[in-house]
Amino acid sequence: MKILLNVTGGIAVYKAIDLTSKLVQAGHEVKVLMTESAQKFVTPLPFQALSRNEVHTDLFDETNPEVVKHIDLADWADINVIAPATAATIGRLAHGIADNMVTTTLIASTKPTLIAPAMNSNMYRNPAVQRNMQLLREMNYHFIDPNSGFLACGYIAEGRMAEPMEIIEAINTFVTAQKYNNDYAGKRLLVTAGPTIERIDAVRYMTNNSTGRMGYALAEAAASRGAIVTLVSGPVHIAPPKGVSVVNVESAEEMFEAVTSRMEEQDIIVKAAAVADYTPVSRLTGKLKKQEGSLDLSFKRTTDILKYLGEHKTHHYLAGFAAETEQVAAYAKGKLEKKNADVIIANNVGDTSIGFKSNNNAVELFFKDGSSHIIEKMPKIDVAHEILTAIKKDDHVR
């Protein structure tokens, strides 16, 4: 993707250097524009070195007679990013003032623009600045909200520019929403993810190898396409996706309660969690001490969440996962019928290249109408989008 990074004058310019590096490492082509004020904080050289492209600073530096530079740059970009965005630049854009390389290029652009404000908290809250931001929103500019934290002025408050990775996430989310035309906008979607753990005593428990990556990818993908997402998660080591409401649980019983108490308000439920089938009949309050000989433990069945959802299904669309090691298709088709699901997503967890701990997956979807859909091996976030596209098509038929 071709990204035009517009850097304006604020102490957060140092973050824009890191942002340039991370965008290039992610495979994007980056060209940088700087205002005169931005150059008071840092020279163009680090941006040029990291982007491997000329940095544009002077509106009147027209050395190529065949092109008008600011028009050529505006046409070149797929997306514009302003980071940091000062109150002055926001005001200029809101009122169509094209008086430097950045504002002239952006006003000439027809491409989407994402703005990452950075300023003192009082400046950020000033009614004039807020009004200018609202004017830009009405003109289809998009804002990446600042964080609260330590500001250069000494305040600990709102106005700190979003971190480079947060800006990249915002870019990715925006591009995804555009690509899929925000096709899940307004849909309420619940995803379960990760393992459950069933405690034996105060220090020991049973669990499985699920990392939660597939469920988290589904939640992230759905949110990026406009869905209102609730993620019910067992214990994992993954940062929650932006814009997703997370409900943390531990046991199968806790997951059952979290899901069933929210089921009626959902349009779509995707059961991606690897829930324990059995739990100890009784749990010791202390630590089970080592003893001579063997140890016998008694287990009971946990409540089958997917089966319960299928039996009590009303308006919502129900998707389940079948993680199998053999006869994958046969078991998935059987599960589809037994659980009264609308689709079962089958994957072979015996294949270590797409198993629980892999960043990739390959699945086959089996639908209630007898049709199926194969998704070849690819990163889990891409698999998630493919699954959501297939569900969306099936959901429209219903």
Image: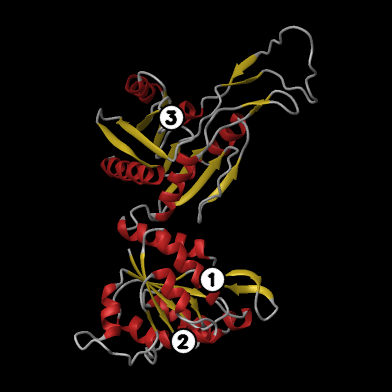
Q: Where residue 220 sits in the image (x, y, percent)?
A: 45, 50
Image-based side of 77 in relation to 324, left or right: left
The amino acid sitting under disc 3 is Thr
List the residue tagged with mark 3: 352
Q: Where residue 259 sits in the image (x, y, percent)?
A: 53, 37
Pair 2/3: label in front: 3
- At x 46%, y 59%, the residue is 169
> Disc 1 vs disc 2: Cβ atoms closer than 8 Å?
no
Image-based side of 329 in relation to 280, left or right: left
- At x 27%, y 44%, the residue is 393
Q: Secondary structure at mark 2?
A: helix
Q: Earlier in the sequence, mark 1 or mark 2?
A: 1
List the residue tagged with mark 2: 91
The amino acid sitting under disc 1 is Lys
Q: Secondary structure at mark 3?
A: loop
The amino acid sitting under disc 2 is Gly
> Disc 2 vs disc 3: Cβ atoms closer than 8 Å?
no
Label placed on residue 327: none
Q: Earlier in the sequence, mark 1 or mark 3?
A: 1
Image-based side of 355 in relation to 10, left or right: left
